[in-house]
Amino acid sequence: MNVIVRVAVSGGAVSGGAVSGEVESRSRAARRSSESAPYELSDFSRVRKFDAHVHLNVEDPTLPDLARENGFELLSINADSPDFPDLLDQRAVAAALAKDDPARIHWATTFSMMGFGTRRWLGRVTAGLAEAKAEGACAVKVWKNIGMTERDADGRLILLDHPVLEPVIDHARSLGLPVIGHQGEPHNCWLPLEHMTTDSDRRYFERHPHFHMHRWPDRPSYEDLIAMRDRFLTTHPRLQFVGAHMGSLEHDIDRLAGFLDRFPRAVVDLASRMSHVQCQSLRDHEHVRAFFIRYQDRLLYGSDMTFNAHTDPVRFRRVAPAIWVSDWRYLATAESQRVGSLRADVPGLALPRDVIDKVYCRNALRVYAISGDGC
């Protein structure tokens, strides 16, 4: 029920909306006065940070050097992607880079779906996980091909909750490896290009039509894939799960909040989804800010930067720091910036320092059981 309140002010009256706005403004100011002061843009280079989602696919020093210069540790994630090198090559590169700089470079392994369902496949995968753990892997990635493109011997799509995958997941948990799950895609994936909310998604699905589910009505729907992931987590309540790319719930932080409430062992990374968050903060800045504060222990910063054999190192050295600084400006400061993917100016969230320290570092160290001097 809406109630209109009027009060006398200097012989006149103000509407309930004005009173409500003033009360909310005072309440917001009171809340912020109890928070730790936000960082400034100038703090970026000196604060310890952790980018929990990158892909180092070749032994090139460019991204590790940039991480060192900008105060980042990195988690390089292997993925069973056709755009990436052979899985054995990915693993060898990640292990070698981590060996060269174990305090800064960390890595997550994955497994191939080739031969799925055979006894040899299961033995090869479980042995591979154990070997990767021994070589220093701190997690295992389950990519979106499971549920979207991989099929069994009978031509049926293989879903994450397929019983043949159960022993793989159980083995990962027994090894102490969190599972990084990339299930589904952004909600935009099921929309026509012209209806997508960000230019970045529009470009990606133009270039990768095989993953643009709007073109493939016979494939699982968005809701099918989210339900599949949730069924999987229901049957693995003790699993440490990291929902890559905001758990594919990037378009609706209220729905993401419900997911985090339902699955207390789950966390999510922010990789390649910042514009979706910014889109929502344009509509309701304080609501998005409150979400980050409430779920400050469940969110991991990640960029999804990828360095492949064909990557231009000169351009990468220019672009990568700009992405990191842009994300810091949005999350850590109140400064406004132009976001090209949204074609809009977006004010920053100015999150409290202790929240930034968790999102940018402490949570990743905890989730991936990485020792360090603290953030």
Image: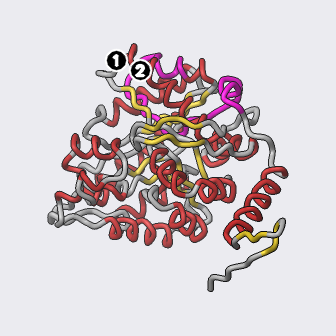
> Three-letter amino acid code at disc 1?
Asp
Between 189 and 265, the residue placed more toward the observer is 189
Q: Which mark is residue 316?
A: 2
- What is the span of residues highlighted in magenta in the rendered image? 40-66
The relative height of residue 134 versus residue 42 in the rendered view (above or below) is below
As for residue 370 lying within the magenta part, the answer is no
Q: Quadrant of the N terminus?
A: bottom right
Q: Can residue 83 be seen by looking at this rendering?
A: yes
Secondary element at tag 1 = loop
User: Which of the colour schemes (rainbow, by chain, secondary structure, one colour) is used?
Assistant: secondary structure
Please tell me which residue lies in front, 134 or 151.
151
| Percent position of residue 220, x then y | 26, 66
The residue nearer to you, when weighing 205 against 127, is: 205
Q: Is residue 105 above or below residue 185?
A: above
Q: Position of residue 272 (x, y in %)?
A: 44, 42
Residue 23 figure quarter:
bottom right
Q: Amino acid at mark 2?
A: Phe
Q: Which residue is mark 1?
A: 312
Mark 2–mark 1 CB contact (< 8 Å): yes
